[in-house]
Amino acid sequence: MLSIDEFRAVFAAAPDGFLIVRSDGTIRAANRKVEQLFGWTAAELEGKPVELLLPESMHDRHRLHRERFARSPHDRPMGAGLDLHARRKDGTDFPVEVSLSPWQAGDGELQVICSVRDVQAVRRLQNFSEGALHASEEERKRIARELHDDTAQRLATLILRVRQLASESDDRDRLALFEQVRGEIVEAADEVKRMARGLRPPEIEELGLAHAVQAHVRTLRESGALRVFADLQPIGPVLNPTAKLALYRIIQEALSNARRHSGAESATVRLYRRDGQVVAEVEDRGRGFPLATAVGGQRGLGLIGMQERATMIGARITVDSIPGEGTRVHVSVPVTAEEQNG
């Protein structure tokens, strides 16, 4: 059991910012990290309203949140899923993560312990990752458009020319050669179309996510690469284009991992809405793998890519894999009230 002096020393030296806030919203105590983050001394903050540490636009809303928390106090992150900012003494704002824990003081008053973490570096990395993913998608879109509009059209023209040459020839050997060449060009044209579809599925913008996933499943089945059982429910227009495309890529990567690494003959993909979430699941009964050793190689890169895409759209992704039993990828994307009503 820590003594009072030991507790004070731990509180002061904690690597995250800690505040103790009274029930009336005034600051009772702040540690050294808070002083570093905000530019105020602990003595200056004592007795001041905690809203002093927030942008002015948040003051009224935060008071309402404080009142609601007081009615039902429990440990929780503050503003889960929101882009929170705090304000320094010099008036500049910075992104933070805040967690709240109720605490009953010695006099019986319900107070709140707030932990504050500066996430500027994390946000910079996230923004860089999002920018890289966006650039990658734009490049995919450009290449898909060139394959469809240029390469595929040229191949189609070649098919017509070979057919015309064959119609003008009476030589059987030459006719057979023309037919062979035509068949090879047709195969190349089909492959170009498959590549263009994989790079940028047209269904996702024209018909929606479920149709795009169904088209990808159909391609896998037709290629014989993997038998895929699909249970895809229409989710409606509840995801923005970025979220739809990111979720499609996660499903695509999960199925690709199942095809290349699992050794399973089949996989199952599900898409549905539940409790304000759009949920996607990909499951196989293959060889599985120990998650702790999956950081290297193509599988590791695929898992990192899925996590980055999930983070970009505020989704939660879990990967469960047991050696000898298989792998399950579960992704849930929160749907905002605006999207649900839109």
Image (cartoon, rainbow, N blue to C red):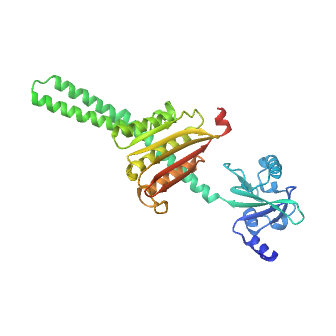
Front residue of 35/25: it is: 25
Q: How many marks?
A: 0
Q: Point out residue 96 in the picture as x, y percentages from the top left corner.
A: 69, 56
| Relative to 123, 106 lies left or right | right
Name the quadrant of the C terminus.
top right
Quarter of the image containing the N terminus?
A: bottom right
Percent position (x, y) of residue 208? 52, 33
State the image coordinates of residue 194 (x, y, percent, origin top left): 36, 37
Q: Is residue 217 above or below residue 258?
A: above
Give the residue at x 44% y 61%: 296
The image shows residue 326, relative to residue 277, as above or below, that is below
Residue drawn 23% across the image and 33% down it: 183
Residue 115 in percent (x, y) is at: 73, 61
What residue appears at the point 35 percent right and 34 percent down from the top-left corner?
150
Q: In this view, does 185 lie above or below 1?
A: above
Depth check: 29 or 161 in front?
29
Determine the image quadrant of residue 159.
Answer: top left
Q: Is residue 102 left or right of residue 275?
A: right
Is residue 157 left or right of 48 when viewed as pictured?
left
Above or below residue 26? Residue 240 is: above
Residue at the far right in the pictured view: 107
Q: For the point 49% across and 52% down, which residue is it?
A: 305
Report the side of 16 relative to 163 (left or right).
right
